[in-house]
Image (spheres, rainbow, N blue to C red):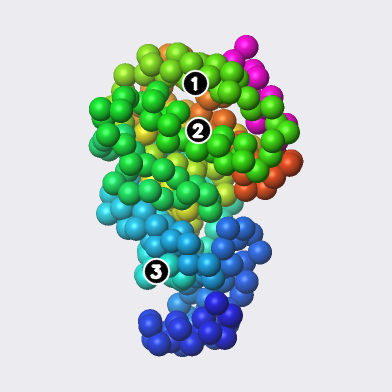
């Protein structure tokens, strides 16, 4: 949607008297704008010209998290296939208090439980994420293989035949997945699904906000593994989480497998730069 069209749409749908639309360069998946209005209100607006369903899915996830209340999210205003409008949160430099609150809040979020997966498929970034699952198909190890790793691997194999992801290697990886995850006996947790530093905001008063959720009921260690993939979170975050809900023994051995899902996704989204990481991670897991 062109900015002039977006301005008109915001006025007709939400009666917003827009003064300026500032593009947000950091928004990678969809064009985004900081919307300033005549009455002083500000909003964050994302658009999807391809109408892939990303924004409707994100709106629904934000609503779930808003009602849950364990951690705050920007107030979702309106979401459909082409436009998502939410409250604008001014980011501040994260403090010790912020990291502590984030760790405690995430543990509270993870205490919510439901059947593995989610009632509908959604997205991880702009990649489809498959969530539908029947308990008769197996527990967590089988869900993680069938609904997380395998779709990403198949997408990558179809786009690049040079990676050497042959059937024998994938069979070994599946066996390793079941071996590593079978001892996990916790109930499913409500997880953010894409919890890296770019998807959290330190708001006013050191208040943590979650953005860009890819919700499902999975193992809580998946969120913690993602926090350590691209730079890691503050030390106080991990201490606060552990004090609120201690991680089970062996979680360090499962971390590389959980991170593989996101490495695969980045390879599918951004290409060659991540291919070597995929091969190296799978090789290290099956050895």
Which mark is drawn over residue 205?
none
Task: Give 161 or 211, whichever is nearer the viewer.
Answer: 161
Q: Give the structural element (helix, strand or loop) at label 3.
A: loop
Local crowd size for mark 3, using a 10 Å CA cut-off: few (<14), some (14–19), many (≥20): some
Q: Tell me if residue 257 comes above or below residue 201 in the rendering.
A: above
Q: Main secondary structure of the magenta part?
A: helix
Taking the magenta stretch, the answer to whether it contains residue 284 is yes
Question: Quarter of the image containing the C terminus?
Answer: top right
The structure residue drawn at horizontal position 39% and vertical position 68%, both measured from the top left corner, is 79
Q: Where does residue 32 sit, x and y in percent of width and height?
A: 56, 68
State which tag comes first along the sequence, 2 or 3.
3
Residue at image mark 1? 174
Q: Is residue 227 visible?
A: no
Magenta segment: 275-287
2 and 3 marks in contact (CB < 8 Å): no
Q: Is residue 181 left or right of residue 162?
A: left
2 and 1 marks in contact (CB < 8 Å): yes
Residue at image mark 2? 150
Residue at image mark 3? 80
Q: Give the structural element (helix, strand or loop) at label 1.
A: helix
Q: Nearer the viewer, mark 2 or mark 3?
A: 2
Q: CA distance from mark 1 to mark 3?
A: 37 Å
Local crowd size for mark 2, using a 10 Å CA cut-off: few (<14), some (14–19), many (≥20): some
Based on the displayed image, in which of its 4 quarters is residue 228 positioned? top right
Q: Where does residue 172 sit, x and y in percent of width and height?
A: 55, 16
Taking the magenta stretch, the answer to whether it contains residue 266 is no
Q: Is residue 273 left or right of residue 112?
A: right
1 and 3 marks in contact (CB < 8 Å): no
Task: Give 270 or 254, whichever is nearer the viewer.
Answer: 270
The structure residue drawn at horizontal position 42% and vertical position 57%, both measured from the top left corner, is 58
Local crowd size for mark 1, using a 10 Å CA cut-off: few (<14), some (14–19), many (≥20): many
Q: CA distance from mark 2 to mark 1?
A: 9 Å
């Amino acid at each position: 949607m062109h900015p002039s069209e977006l301005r008109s749409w915001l006025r007709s749908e939400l009666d917003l008297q827009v003064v300026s639309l500032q593009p947000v360069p950091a928004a990678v998946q969809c064009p985004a704008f900081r919307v300033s209005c005549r009455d002083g209100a500000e909003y964050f607006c994302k658009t999807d010209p391809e109408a892939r369903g990303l924004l409707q899915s994100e709106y629904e996830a934000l609503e779930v998290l808003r009602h849950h209340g364990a951690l705050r999210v920007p107030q979702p205003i309106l979401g459909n296939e082409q436009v998502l409008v939410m409250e604008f949160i001014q980011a501040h430099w994260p403090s010790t208090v912020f990291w502590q609150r984030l760790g405690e809040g995430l543990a509270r979020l993870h205490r919510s439980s439901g059947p593995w997966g989610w009632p509908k498929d959604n997205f991880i970034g702009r990649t489809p994420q498959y969530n539908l699952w029947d308990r008769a198909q197996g527990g967590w190890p089988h869900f993680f293989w069938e609904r997380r790793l395998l779709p990403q691997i198949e997408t990558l194999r179809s786009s690049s035949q040079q990676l050497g992801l042959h059937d024998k290697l994938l069979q070994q990886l599946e066996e390793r997945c079941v071996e590593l995850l079978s001892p996990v006996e916790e109930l499913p947790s409500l997880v953010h699904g894409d919890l890296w530093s770019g998807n959290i905001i330190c708001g006013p008063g050191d208040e943590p906000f979650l953005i860009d959720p890819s919700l499902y009921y999975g193992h809580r260690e998946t969120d913690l593994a993602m926090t350590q993939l691209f730079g890691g979170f503050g030390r106080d975050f991990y201490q606060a989480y552990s004090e609120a809900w201690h991680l089970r023994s062996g979680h360090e051995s499962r971390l590389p497998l959980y991170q593989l899902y996101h490495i695969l996704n980045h390879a599918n989204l951004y290409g060659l730069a991540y291919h070597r990481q995929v091969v190296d991670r799978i090789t290290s897991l099956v050895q």
